[in-house]
Image (cartoon, rainbow, N blue to C red):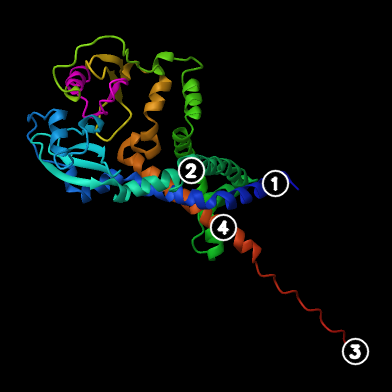
Amino acid sequence: MTFKKAIGKLHLWLGLGSGLVVLIVSLTGAIFTFQDEIRDLTEPWRKVEMPATAPLLLPSRLQAAALEQHPGVKAATTWVTYYGPGRSATVYFTDPAGVPTQVYLNPCSGRVLYEQDLRRHFFSIVQAIHMTLLLPEAVAKWVVGGSVIIFMVMLGTGLVLWWPKRRQERRQRLTIKWGARWRRINYDLHNVLGFYAASIAVVLALTGLFMVFPGLLDSAMLVANGGRTYPQEKSVAQVDTLQAVTAAALPLPDVIYRTVQRHSRGAEMVLIGPAGNGKDPAYCWAYQRALHYYHRDEYAFHPVSGQVLQARFHAGRSNGGKLSDMNYDLHTGQILGLGGKIVAFLASLISASLPVTGTLLWWGRRNKKAKPKARASAPISA
């Protein structure tokens, strides 16, 4: 068996084994790419009209308004997010019945605009399928992660199979012969589109694997840092529970919000985590742009006094730290704006099509009709 035939066998059987998972993960990824744009069009409560100079309510006021109809939920367990000019704020919590709920409010008046049960939200379901296939997390990690790794191997073996032997064949390998029979069109769709999408598909697959296997991201960060390590970027803030502290004069979320406003000026999106149990820090993330997760500052606060225990600013991050911060935006393509999203969307659709066109190729070859042999002419009798 030649090297190329062995590669072909490997490509085939890996594809048949992982194709269904790759199809589902790629298709849901394509759907999720434009979730913010689609939701802005279909969910009017995500935006509000307010004067540019209107003051925003403090988090404790938003929590009180959101929980008015949920007296069993403690404010200390909620997440509060400000999304910037023209956008509503949200309060997220899980109610006593275990329902994950997101309440949208006018950040200036505190009026509740909409209450959303995230269990039934379309894009929450799409995201869950994309990340876990609705399997238990421990199982999904290896089913989804393993299939994505196989997909990356297949991109490499596919490139070997695609590579033309002669220069004059390259043009044929780069164009789809639309006027041919359907089997030839299917062959071209698999090979030509796969070649064009391969480089973007590798980026999407790698950034997805970084979310599933943090150790891979650590390795990528080490490479980006030229082998240097930055322990301060991995350090975890600690609360000294033996030290006597004075409780903050304001509710903790309000202290956090005002502190972040002073130190992260211009941040459009501010995410304030739960206040905690008094033993663990309270966290806050400030993002430069709404709905973008790359450029961010991170804070840890004392859960009683509101004192800043740790602050990491984007400007001081290492190259590896910035790579980690941009991972989600790379995965969705939004690191390059709308154009990047379109590219990610098309690459995801092509990735979803490859298991289909590949299976059709395999099935067609297995069931190819044999050409009838020419009958020998009868001898002429004397």
- Residue underneath mark 2: 140
Say whether residue 168 is left or right of residue 95. right
* Residue type of the residue flagged with mark 2: Ala
SS of the residue under disc 4: helix
SS of the residue under disc 2: helix
Gap between marks 3 and 4, in whole Å?
53 Å
Between circles 2 and 1, the one closer to the viewer is 2
Gap between marks 2 and 1, in whole Å?
30 Å
Front position in the image: 299 or 64: 64
Q: Can residue 31 be seen in this view?
A: yes
The numbered mark, 3 or 4, whose residue comes first in the sequence reads: 4
- Residue underneath mark 1: 6
Gap between marks 2 and 3, in whole Å?
75 Å
Gap between marks 1 and 4, in whole Å?
18 Å
- Residue underneath mark 4: 359
Q: In the picture shown, does residue 335 fall above or below 97? A: above
